[in-house]
Image (cartoon, rainbow, N blue to C red):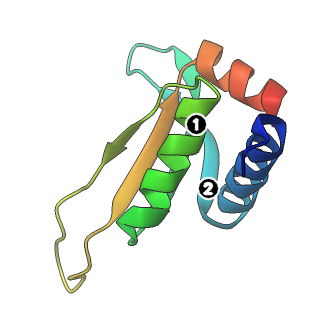
Amino acid sequence: MDNQLERLHLNIGYLLGLIDGEGCYQLESDGRGHFYPSLTIGNTDLGIILLAQACLKEINVGCWIWSPKAHGKEKRKMYRLYVKGIKRMMFLLNIL
């Protein structure tokens, strides 16, 4: 796709679908009585998470990926993409 606006709409649609299916909005505590909004997207397919990261990067939303250590009976590697903070979340929610 060479049309930048169409690619932007496609990326936003991809993010919306991924957030709807795999995402979680929440308020997290910093342990000192302050709360901040966050978005977490979890999946076992790294390709999906990397594509979501690329979509967020294209719309200038900071995020990072973390992979917790597998424990117990679960042997699959899990990947989580995080967007945290009031400024990032307000910017992202206004776009979406």
Q: Mark 1: few, some, or many residues within 10 Å (few <14, many ≥20)?
A: some
Residue 4 image position (x, y, % from top left): 76, 36
Q: Mark 2: few, some, or many residues within 10 Å (few <14, many ≥20)?
A: some
Height in image: 38 above or below 45?
Answer: above
Residue behind mark 2: 23
Residue at position x 54%, y 50% in the image: 52
- The one nearer the camera, 32 or 42, is 42
Height in image: 73 above or below 62?
Answer: below
Q: Is residue 4 left or right of residue 19?
A: right
- The disc labelled 1 sits on which kind of residue? Leu
Height in image: 50 above or below 44?
Answer: above
Mark 2 touching mark 1, by CB under 8 A? no
- The one nearer the camera, 33 or 84, is 84
Sequence-first tag of 2 and 1: 2
User: Is residue 78 shown to the viewer in this render?
Assistant: yes
Residue at position x 50%, y 54% in the image: 51
Residue 27 image position (x, y, % from top left): 60, 33
Height in image: 77 above or below 41?
Answer: below
User: Is residue 27 shown to the viewer in this render?
Assistant: no
Q: Is residue 78 left or right of residue 41?
A: left
The picture quadrant where one finds residue 43 is bottom left
| Nearest-to-viewer mark from 2 and 1 | 1
Residue behind mark 1: 56
* Tag shown at residue 2: none
The kind of secondary structure element at disc 2 is strand
- The one nearer the camera, 81 or 61, is 61
The picture quadrant where one finds residue 22 is bottom right
Residue at position x 65%, y 28% in the image: 59
- The disc labelled 2 sits on which kind of residue? Gly
The kind of secondary structure element at disc 1 is helix
Q: Is residue 17 left or right of residue 23?
A: right
